[in-house]
Image (spheres, coloured by chain):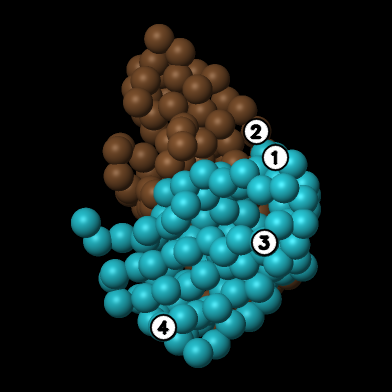
Chain colours: A brown, B cyan
Amino acid sequence: AQSVTQLDSQVPVFEEAPVELRCNYSSSVSVYLFWYVQYPNQGLQLLLKYLSGSTLVKGINGFEAEFNKSQTSFHLRKPSVHISDTAEYFCAVTETGANNLFFGTGTRLTVIP
Amino acid sequence: NAGVTQTPKFQVLKTGQSMTLQCAQDMNHNSMYWYRQDPGMGLRLIYYSASEGTTDKGEVPNGYNVSRLNKREFSLRLESAAPSQTSVYFCASTLNVNTNYGYTFGSGTRLTVV
């Protein structure tokens, strides 16, 4: 069965510092992986996705993620964060042929001025 | 603007009352979903509709029913609300279940059951 673990529930980071939000998944078959962002009182927006091909995926707002099959990870990174990046970030996984996404419990990123 | 529209945005119910959460999308998507979001638990799937005329249970279907009214609309009904159903509810849609374009989410309905 597929599942997603986001190891950090909260990540505080100073403005212009780099950040990494961790995501690990479990699945016995091929997967597709996603990162979503949720700003306060809003729905979720797609940041980036990995379907196949290059393991380094670039998304919106300067975020990128790297798929590591051997470590079953899909960590999200940004080299320099802004105040506006303060939000909750969700990792999600689906298996090929599956009908829905499974979400992690989320990581709240707080950017400190 | 194209997207997923949810109504109402906020609702307070008394225990035992019923209500229907509405969701509509105008992107010609075939698949639609209802999730609930609770602190520390992420998003959990309640029901989904892979295509018009079909619905299936997700991870937490108890206490809910759904109707895929047409291709655009997918409603979620609470027949007898309980405090445990206090949550934020999100509707989402995607082109097809297996295409993995990613989901488009509505802005949510914040439901409180007292």
Q: Which mark is residue B18?
A: 3
Mark 3 touches mark 2? (CB < 8 Å): no
Give percent across and percent down for residue B45.
63, 63
Q: Label 3 to label 2, Cα distance in Å?
A: 34 Å
Can the viewer see residue A93? no
Residue A92 vertical position relative to residue B88 in the rendered view, above or below: below
Please tell me how crowded label 4 is: few (under 14), some (14-19), or many (20+) other residues with Cα within 10 Å: few
Query: Does A39 appear above or below B77?
Result: above
- Foreground: disc 3 or disc 4: 3
- Distance, label 4 to label 2, CA atoms, is 38 Å
For mark 3, give the secondary structure: loop
Around disc 1, counting alpha carbons within 10 Å, would you say few (fewer than 14), some (14 to 19), or many (20 or more)?
few
Tell me the kind of residue under disc 1.
Gly
Q: Secondary structure at mark 4?
A: loop
Q: Chain of mark 3?
A: B
User: In the figure, A70 relative to B10: above or below?
Assistant: below
- The chain letter under disc 2 is A
Q: Nearer the viewer, residue A75 or B87?
A: B87
Q: Are marks 3 and 1 in contact (CB under 8 Å)?
A: no
Q: What is the secondary structure assignment of the residue under circle 2?
A: loop
Residue type for callout 4 = Asn
Q: Chain of mark 1?
A: B
Q: Which residue is mark 1?
A: B40
The label on residue B70 is 4
Query: Residue visible at 33% across and 48% down?
Result: A59
Tell me if A75 is positioned left or right of A43 in this view.
right
Which mark sits nearer the N-terminus, 3 or 4?
Answer: 3
Residue A35 x %, y %: 47, 50
Place of residue A55 in the rendered image (x, y in percent of width and height, measured from the top left): 42, 57
Labels 4 and 2 in the same subunit: no
Residue beneath the point at 40% across and 9% down: A113
Q: Which residue is mark 2?
A: A9
